[in-house]
Amino acid sequence: MNESEWMEDARVASIPKEKLLFLQKMFFESKKLSQKELMPFFMALAGRAKKENISFNQQETDLILAVIRDHSSPEECKKIDQTLKLFAGKKQ
């Protein structure tokens, strides 16, 4: 996936640019991490988001994930799925 092409997708035009930039940074920083390193990374990221007053509602989250998937390779989609499963398991 090109690092910024997903942000140009018309479907995310209504989402504030600072949110998109925050997500872009998150996705590309996390690409090099192992499955074991992801949870601590995302916990730290959640703290950073709170500090920067950045939050996403469910509609934004679903839309962004759909757009990112459309601009991702099958391998990248697999990693997204694994990450989402990791979070779903931690919420239970």
Image (tube, rainbow, N blue to C red):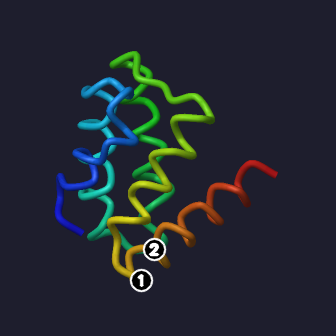
Q: Quadrant of residue 15?
A: top left
Above/below status of 17 relative to 85:
above
Q: Position of residue 47 (x, y in %)?
A: 43, 30
Amino acid identity at mark 1 = Pro
Give the labeled residue for mark 2. Answer: 77
Q: Which mark is residue 64?
A: none
Above/below status of 51 relative to 48:
above
Circle 1 crowding by C-alpha within 10 Å: few under 14, some 14–19, many from 20: few
Residue at x 39%, y 58% (from the top left corner) = 68
Which residue lies most toward the bottom here? Answer: 75
Give the labeled residue for mark 1. Answer: 74
> In this rendering, would 27 be left or right of 91?
left
- Screen quadrant of the N terminus: bottom left
Q: Position of residue 92 (x, y in %)?
A: 82, 52
Q: Position of residue 46 (x, y in %)?
A: 46, 35
**Mark 1, secondary structure of its residue:** helix
**Mark 2, secondary structure of its residue:** helix
**Which is nearer the eye, 78 or 70?**
70
Q: Position of residue 34 (x, y in %)?
A: 39, 74
Q: How many marks?
A: 2
**Mark 2–mark 1 distance (CA, rounded to whole Å):** 5 Å
Which residue lies most toward the front here? Answer: 10
Please report contact status of discs 2 and 1: CB closer than 8 Å, yes or no: yes
Amino acid identity at mark 2 = Cys
> In this rendering, would 42 be left or right of 71?
right
Residue at x 46%, y 52% (from the top left corner) = 40
**Which is nearer the eye, 43 or 79?**
79
**Which is nearer the eye, 72 or 47?**
72
